[in-house]
Image: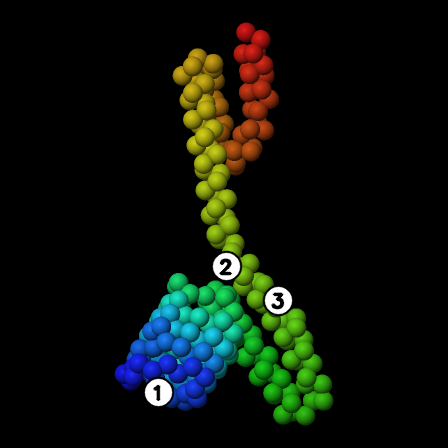
Amino acid sequence: MADDGQDRGGRDLSGADLSGSNFAGQDLSGADLTGANLTGANLRGTNLAGADLREADLTGANLTGANLDGATLTGATLTGANLEEGDGAGGETPLVSLVQAVVSGAIISLGVFLFVADWSLFWLVFVVGFVAVLPAATKLAERYESRPADEDEADGEDEDKQASALATLRDRYASGEIDEAEFERRVERLLETESVEDAETAYGGATAEAEREKELE
């Protein structure tokens, strides 16, 4: 479907076949897109704030940089969708948004099932689900997303410290402060320890003593 170049903010587009449409940079805020076919649609930089995308098919859609703040994605199909530069609904990452959509859908489905089954306390599912289960699932997803980045950053910092420590040892060896045997021993010890902090603990006392002897000279 070709794009007509018009903004559709707040319009009812539920169930519409919008596959392959180009909505790049347009305003679709608050639009009703429930069940809409948006496969392969170009939604790059599109304003989808507050849009209702429940059960929408976004397979292969380009959502890079799209504003999904407050958008509802419950039951939406996001297979192959491109969200690399943009965040998910509410500013979350794609994984967090996906977890929220799946958990929300499960809570609603269970609540409706228990309602149909005539269970008088069916409403407890919604209370517990949205107050406790959904936030907990979101936190777990956020922690999973942030963990690799934190570990990579820590590894990078440790490598920088190790390089700095090796440079210091080379300078001390070049200046004659330590002999070749001591230099090799400390380099080997530094490379074998799990962290720079471990190495500093291992021979930090010897380094401090050497510095005191140097001051006395």
Residue 193 or residue 71, whichever sits in front: 71
Whether 142 is drawn above or below 192: the answer is below
The single residue placed furthest to the front in the displayed view is: 6
Would you say residue 78 is visible in this rendering?
Answer: no
Would you say residue 88 is visible in this rendering?
Answer: yes
Residue 161 image position (x, y, % from top left) = 48, 34
Whether 124 is drawn above or below 132: the answer is below
Colouring scheme, one of rainbow, by chain, secondary structure, one colour:
rainbow
Q: Amino acid at mark 1?
A: Asp
Mark 2 — residue? 145
Q: Secondary structure at mark 2?
A: helix
The tag on residue 136 is: 3
**Mark 3 Cα shell of 10 Å, populated few (<14), some (14-19), many (≥20):** few
Q: Quadrant of residue 58?
A: bottom left
Q: CA distance from mark 1 to mark 3?
A: 36 Å
Q: Amino acid at mark 3?
A: Ala
Q: Quadrant of residue 46?
A: bottom left
Residue 137 or residue 49, whichever sits in front: 49
Mark 1 — residue? 17
Q: CA distance from mark 2 to mark 3?
A: 14 Å
Residue 13 image position (x, y, % from top left) = 41, 87
Q: Secondary structure at mark 3?
A: helix
Whether 182 is drawn above or below 166: the answer is above
**Marks 1, 3: nearer the viewer:** 1
**Marks 2, 1: nearer the viewer:** 1
**Mark 1 Cα shell of 10 Å, populated few (<14), some (14-19), many (≥20):** some
Q: Secondary structure at mark 1?
A: loop
Q: Residue at x 47, y 48 (%)?
A: 152
